[in-house]
Image (cartoon, rainbow, N blue to C red):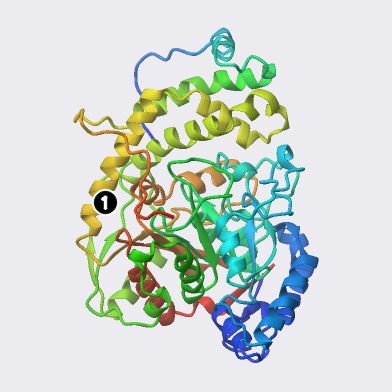
């Protein structure tokens, strides 16, 4: 594995390695054309995607037409948004009109939607260019393992292709990290945006539930599903959400631009720190612990006031609740497929559906009742602070195909509490160890994504982690 | 991750798994999937019992948290 240092090679940095913010500015001032940018990504895909398998479907011809059109519009003075002319990709559980939406499954190889998912529609309306569909665990779900029994090869981690990308938005994490897409949309139920972001060193964000539409995304768990973007920098992620929020939010509840949070100081910010997973889960791996403590020191140097706190409901208990909610709802959603097409599924999906079929209603409801406790108690905790920081994963990216390592990476995390509670969360890279990315989470009060961006951007600007890029 | 109960284990039988499949419309599953269903009965029940119960009967299930209308 080798790195490209953008700091030392700024002038020579290939187009796939420039940030979304820079690409946006250059396209807006017409020093870069959407077509040239798109071609850089198509070349990057041709160069590396046979090793990382981030894509299931590349729609080069449609993308070229859209990029040429965007170029004409911008040249004519019809600039639509900061995302106009910028290439992106979506997890293959998103509907795109006229494009296969397999959700990584043999059961849906012939499925071609006639309508775009709401978020795809919004990005297209903003002028963004869809390159294609990204790899995913089957139906955007699974049991943590990888069994090499799906119709597409699994995505591989660009930092080490023998390691797992994190699931289920496997291709989204791989593509953003490897530069085969400028940004991506994934979906999260109990970590499926944040796990790939963690394993691949990208930014992964879930906003307050309800901010972004799930329409046109194959459901996995009605009560927990939430879409989210993956990008390389905090500012890039802010620009994506600014575009999506602007088109989604109730006009009576307009939020200030998240991009305005970028670069602002955090002096005096009160930040809660959860450094203990609590009973039931192991301590974080030593490199993650060291990275976490070093990141806290950076926040202190930036003037934040840190207070160590504990989660009111331990992460392991939250996971136990999600272990009832997720499989039961998935089994309800895909009951017909289990009854009629079980032998066409991969092991992971079938196993989850079988387990979900066995969940008692009493246990499901106990989990949903615990969820209320988690939400209210976490709300009470976080309201006393500007933000909360904690570990993301408790393990380093595991070896692909080594089931115990992969399931531990997926299960033993600090992710589930915030799915249950409905707080906005960002997964951010906070260092590297032996070439593999480290990670942490920044959690905000409900509806206050802006503070997350402010903390994350202050941290990012004070560190050099964004200057490393993966070379698979 | 979770401590196991010291109660005597009651291992599910393949007949129990077959009966469950018959009752719930899964009778067409292949025998190997029914065998897997049998393996899953005990852990799913165990995990279900691990979920903390609320002592307050007015604590209703929270099926969704939508702060903003999409």
| Residue drawn at x 65%, y 30% as measured from the top left | A337
* Residue on which the image places disc 1: A378
Image quadrant in which you'd find residue A354? top right
Residue A347 coordinates in the image, percent (x, y): 65, 34
On screen, residue A323 versus residue A271, left or right, reads: right
Residue A199 coordinates in the image, percent (x, y): 54, 59
On screen, residue A241 versus residue A97, left or right, reads: left
On screen, residue A170 versus residue A432, left or right, reads: right
Answer few, some or many: residues within 10 Å of disc 1's Cα (few below 14, many 20 plus, some between 14 and 19).
many
**Which quarter of the figure is the C terminus of chain A placed in?**
bottom right
Residue A418 coordinates in the image, percent (x, y): 37, 51
Secondary structure of residue under mark 1: helix
Q: Relative to residue B48, is residue A114 depicted above or below?
A: below
Residue A452 coordinates in the image, percent (x, y): 36, 68
**Residue in the foreground of this view, choosing between A268 and A309:** A268
Image quadrant in which you'd find residue A105? top right
Residue A192 visible here: no
Q: Relative to residue A107, is residue A77 depicted above or below?
A: below
Residue A395 visible here: yes
């Amino acid at each position: 594995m080798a790195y490209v240092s953008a700091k030392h090679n700024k002038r020579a940095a290939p187009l796939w390695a420039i940030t979304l913010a820079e690409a946006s500015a250059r396209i807006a001032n017409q020093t870069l054309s959407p077509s040239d940018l798109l071609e850089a990504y198509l070349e990057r895909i041709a160069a590396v995607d046979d090793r990382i398998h981030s894509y299931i479907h590349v729609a080069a011809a449609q993308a070229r037409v859209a990029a040429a059109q965007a170029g004409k519009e911008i040249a004519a003075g019809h600039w639509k948004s900061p995302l106009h002319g910028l290439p992106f990709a979506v997890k293959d559980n998103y509907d795109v009109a006229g494009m296969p939406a397999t959700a990584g499954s043999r059961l849906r190889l012939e499925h071609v939607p006639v309508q775009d998912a709401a978020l795809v529609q919004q990005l297209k309306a903003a002028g963004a260019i869809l390159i294609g569909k990204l790899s995913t665990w089957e139906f955007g779900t699974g049991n943590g393992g990888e069994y090499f029994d799906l119709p597409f090869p699994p995505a591989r981690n660009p930092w080490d292709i023998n390691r797992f990308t994190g699931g289920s938005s496997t291709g989204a994490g791989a593509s953003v990290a490897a530069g085969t897409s400028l940004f991506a949309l994934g979906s999260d139920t109990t970590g499926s945006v944040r796990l790939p972001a963690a394993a691949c060193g990208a930014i992964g964000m879930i906003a307050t539930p309800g901010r972004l539409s799930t329409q046109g995304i194959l459901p996995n768990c009605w009560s927990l599903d939430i879409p989210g973007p993956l990008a390389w920098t905090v500012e890039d992620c802010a620009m994506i959400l600014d575009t999506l929020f602007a088109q989604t939010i109730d006009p009576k509840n307009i939020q200030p631009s998240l991009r305005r949070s970028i670069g602002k100081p955090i002096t005096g910010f009160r930040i809660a720190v959860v450094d203990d997973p609590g009973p039931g889960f192991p301590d974080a791996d030593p490199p993650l612990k060291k990275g976490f403590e070093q990141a806290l020191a950076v926040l202190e140097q930036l003037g934040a006031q840190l207070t160590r706190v504990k989660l009111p409901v331990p992460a392991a208990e939250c996971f136990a609740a999600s272990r009832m909610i997720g499989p039961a709802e998935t089994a309800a959603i895909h009951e017909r497929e289990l009854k009629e097409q079980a032998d066409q599924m991969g092991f992971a999906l079938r196993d989850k559906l079988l387990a979900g079929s066995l969940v008692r209603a009493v246990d499901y409801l106990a989990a949903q009742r615990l969820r209320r406790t988690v939400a209210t108690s976490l709300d009470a905790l976080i309201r006393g602070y500007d933000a909360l920081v904690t570990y993301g994963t408790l393990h380093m990216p595991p070896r692909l195909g080594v089931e115990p390592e992969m399931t531990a990476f997926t299960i033993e995390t600090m992710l589930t509490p915030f799915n249950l509670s409905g707080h906005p969360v960002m997964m951010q890279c906070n260092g590297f160890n032996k070439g593999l990315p480290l990670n942490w989470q920044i959690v905000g009060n409900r509806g206050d994504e802006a503070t997350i961006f402010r903390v994350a951007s202050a941290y990012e600007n004070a560190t050099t982690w964004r200057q490393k890029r993966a070379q698979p | 991750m979770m401590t196991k109960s010291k109660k005597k284990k009651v291992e599910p039988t393949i007949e129990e798994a077959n009966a469950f499949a018959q009752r719930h419309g899964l009778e067409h599953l292949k025998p190997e999937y029914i065998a897997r269903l049998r393996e899953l009965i005990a852990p799913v029940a165990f995990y279900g019992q691990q979920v903390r119960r609320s002592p307050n009967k007015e604590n209703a299930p929270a099926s969704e948290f939508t702060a903003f209308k999409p």
